[in-house]
Image (cartoon, helix red, strand yellow):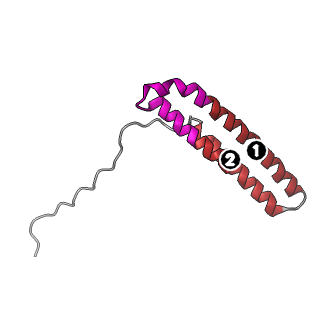
Amino acid sequence: MHDRVAELAGLRAELANCENGPRESRRGKTGEVQEQIERVRGELETEAEQLEARAESLAANGQDVPSAEAAVAARDIRTALQGDEPADESPKRSGKRTTAAAKAPQTRGGGS
C-alpha cells in the first residue's frame, strides 16, 4: 500500500512538472503520466475496497482489533486518493493573504 501511495505522490509531482515546469519537452508526456496516475489510482481503489470488506468480515467475527487496523488502512488509502480530486466546495483564492499588524493604541497627552 505505502509503495503505491508513494508512487501516486511521485506521479502527481511529475504531472505538475509536465504541466507547469520550465521544459517544453515534458509537456508532451502529460498524457502518459496521467495514464500512470489512473493505473495506480485503480490499484489503490481495489485495495481499499478489499480492506473495507476484510474489516467488515473481521468485525462480524468479533475480531475488533484486526478489523480496526484494516479499516484504518482503507481510510488512509481513501485519503491519499482524494489528493488529486478538486475540492468543489472550497472557494478559489488567489494571491498572497497576510494579516495586517494591529495598530498601536493611541495615548492622550497629560497624565500625572
Q: Residue 63, labelled with which disc? A: none
**Residue pictured at 80% horizontal, 57% vertical:** 67
Which image quarter: residue 42?
A: top right
Q: Amino acid at mark 2?
A: Ile
- Structural crowding at the residue carrying mark 1, measured as other residues with C-alpha within 10 Å and reported as few (<14), some (14–19) or many (≥20): some
Q: Is there CB contact under 8 Å for labels 2 and 1?
A: yes
Quarter holding the C terminus is bottom left
- Place of residue 110 in the rendered image (x, y in percent of width and height, measured from the top left): 9, 69
- Indicate the quadrant where residue 33 lies: top right
Q: Which amino acid lies under the numbered mark 1 shown in the image of this protein?
A: Glu
Q: Main secondary structure of the magenta part?
A: helix
Residue 15: x, y in percent?
53, 33
Q: Position of residue 66 (x, y in %)?
A: 80, 60
Q: Dot 1 corresponds to which residue?
A: 47
User: Which residue lies under the disc numbered 2?
Assistant: 77
Q: Residue at x 78, y 43 (%)?
A: 49
Q: Nearer the viewer, residue 75 or 99?
A: 75
Q: Residue at x 56, y 42 (%)?
A: 10
25, 97: nearer the viewer? 25
Quick one: label 2, few (<14), some, or many (20+) residues within 10 Å? many
- Element marked by disc 1: helix
Q: Is residue 58 magenta?
A: no
**Which residue in the rendered view is the most extreme toward the right?**
61
Residue at (68, 47) in percent of width and height: 77
Secondary element type, mark 2: helix
Is residue 27 on the magenta stretch? yes
Q: Position of residue 62 (x, y in %)?
A: 88, 61
**In this picture, residue 102 sits left or right of residue 25:** left
**Residue 44 higher or lower than 105, as above or below:** above
Q: Which residues are drawn in magenta? A: 10-34
| First reached walking from the N terminus: tag 2 or tag 1 | 1
